[in-house]
Amino acid sequence: MADTVTSASAPAGAGANGRTALAFDEIGMVFPDGTEALRDISFQVDRGEFVTIVGPSGCGKSTLLKIASGLLTNTAGTVQVDRERIGYVFQDATLLPWRNVQANVELFAELHKIGKAERRKLADEAIELVGLKGFENHYPKSLSGGMKMRASLARTLTLRPPVFLFDEPFGAVDEITREHLNDETQQLFQREGFAGLFITHSISEAVFMSTRVLVMSARPGQIVAEYEVPFDYPRVPDLRFDPEFANLAGEVSHALRGGHS
Amino acid sequence: MTTELTDTVGVDGAAGPGGDQTPTFDAAPPEPYRTKSRARQTAETVLPPLVLGAAIIGLWYVVTYVFLDPGKRFLLRPPHEVWQVGFADWENFSEILGGLWSSTRVAMIGLAIAIAIGFFLAIIMSQAKVIERGIFPFMVVLQAIPILAIVPLISFWFGTGQTARILVCVIISLFPIIVNTLFGLQSAERGTHDLFTLHNASRLTRLRKLMLPAAMPAIFAGLRISAGLSVIGAIVGDFFFGRGDVGIGQLLQRYANQLDGEQLLAAVFMSSALGVAVFLIFGWIQNLAISRWHESGSGGI
């Protein structure tokens, strides 16, 4: 709680409804070498909202998450978020190779100085939730890409983060595994009700999981379009073949290619 | 800016085999398909060195009995005489073993001190680039001094006792430990560092739970190199100082002076055996410590 980041003047509207978990206000980012990565980004993510940003590679999507988490400091604008228990899943699983699945999943709780018994319980639950039961004693070198990603998800879940950042976590796994993981992530979201911010360049992934899709332009990244996704949760895999789904995906794709409508 | 999370930290290749921190994308490399029987596989592994070994012994006999005329045969005694005089004669062999033991002790004490100093320096160097930049050039200079140039200096300052010998071992084995440990400490992936940053880990926690475990493979690679060097340092020091507790270096010198060809060769073989033993022991410890999670496995023989 103490770590809520604000600047002198709180951005108007942020936290207005009391459910806003993450608010960007006129965020700009210029790197020391002069590269302008982000320009004038403003949006909010409420609890119980799953927002996805799609954009071409190199448009600064990841930079935005780094700013939200505090790994990078923005050069303009303000971020409001509670960083105490922020969940952040990277593009790579970033498991520690010398720890088995159990110990890897317990890492964050360990860093937050949670006691051994409690840590174990949290990890057991998270491992169960991502379907890695039975693999607790495996080392990362013997896991497939999808399983590593599951372990990475479980590790983040142990903290029950109210804000969950995903940086293209399923980019490196095969299509079938990706759809499974999309399905599971969507169920986790439904169960945990966190505020989710998901980065991807897969339109189908974006539409399938989100309540809202934002389209980002090429560098400097700006939000150029926004779509509400009307489908109810839980979403079934066959939703991907629904005409309405295809329509929406088509619109997002169109916006991504440069048209604004 | 997208960070390449899979990148291993690149340091110059000076560390030698310490750098094999591969990103773990896939499971273990595929085993070759088994189409041969186990017995045949064993034979194919064991036979080549046996055959070559036999050929070398054969060549040795040829040199002794064919090329050397009888008056010069003391230069290379035939294998069976080396065995009888150097190994089978307990009095002679126990003298070699005694020298070997003395040198091993010196080498291991020196190695232990080098490990302590090396770890300490590598850890503080890993904590701040400024310190690394300050210390590193001196380490390179120290490493560049030929051991034969420093031994007279050491005896000049510290005499020829145990201290001087141990010091030779420390100096000769310090550099690989520092370089490999430092390289290892810097080898943890950027993404894993980000995790520790996100969760406000202290410097000590980061060191204990991230940098040190990540450094283990490189540390062991350095240890194996340094252990071998330390043995060489002990022998060279003893050989040069030529006084005090009799080590294998003094024995080598004495056998050579007395033209004891059999014992000289036996002592050379045993020195080599010591080096191999040290290498294997450290490989075995490495295996125990990291083979569960690290790809490289044991490496070496």
Image (cartoon, grey):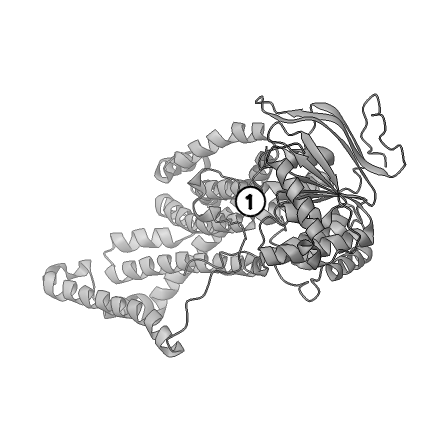
Spot occupied by residue B104 in the image (x, y as percentages of width and height): 45, 55
Q: Residue at x 45, y 60 (%)?
A: B280
Quarter of the image where one finds residue B44: bottom left
Quarter of the image where one finds residue A105: bottom right
Which image quarter is the C terminus of chain A in? top right
| Residue A224 seen anywhere in this rendered image of the structure | yes
| Residue A151 seen anywhere in this rendered image of the structure | no
Left or right, A214 with reference to B62:
right
Q: Nearer the viewer, residue A146 or B133?
A: A146
Q: Secondary structure at mark 1?
A: loop
Left or right, A213 with reference to B244:
right
Left or right, B155 with reference to B194:
left
Left or right, A128 with reference to B152:
right
Q: Amino acid at mark 1?
A: Thr
Q: Residues within 10 Å of mark 1 (few under 14, many from 20)?
A: some
Which image quarter is the N terminus of chain A in? top right
Spot occupied by residue A60 in the image (x, y as percentages of width and height): 63, 33
Spot occupied by residue A63 in the image (x, y as percentages of width and height): 65, 33
Quarter of the image where one finds residue B97: bottom left
Q: Nearer the viewer, residue A49 or A242?
A: A242
User: Which chain does tag 1 point to?
Assistant: B
Eyeballing the image, is A6 above or below B260?
above
Spot occupied by residue B214 in the image (x, y as percentages of width and height): 58, 48
Q: Nearer the viewer, residue B277 or B91?
A: B277
Q: Nearer the viewer, residue A171 or B232?
A: A171
Q: Count up the numbered dots.
A: 1
Eyeballing the image, is A186 above or below A39?
below
Instruction: Name the residue that disc number 1 marks.
Output: B6
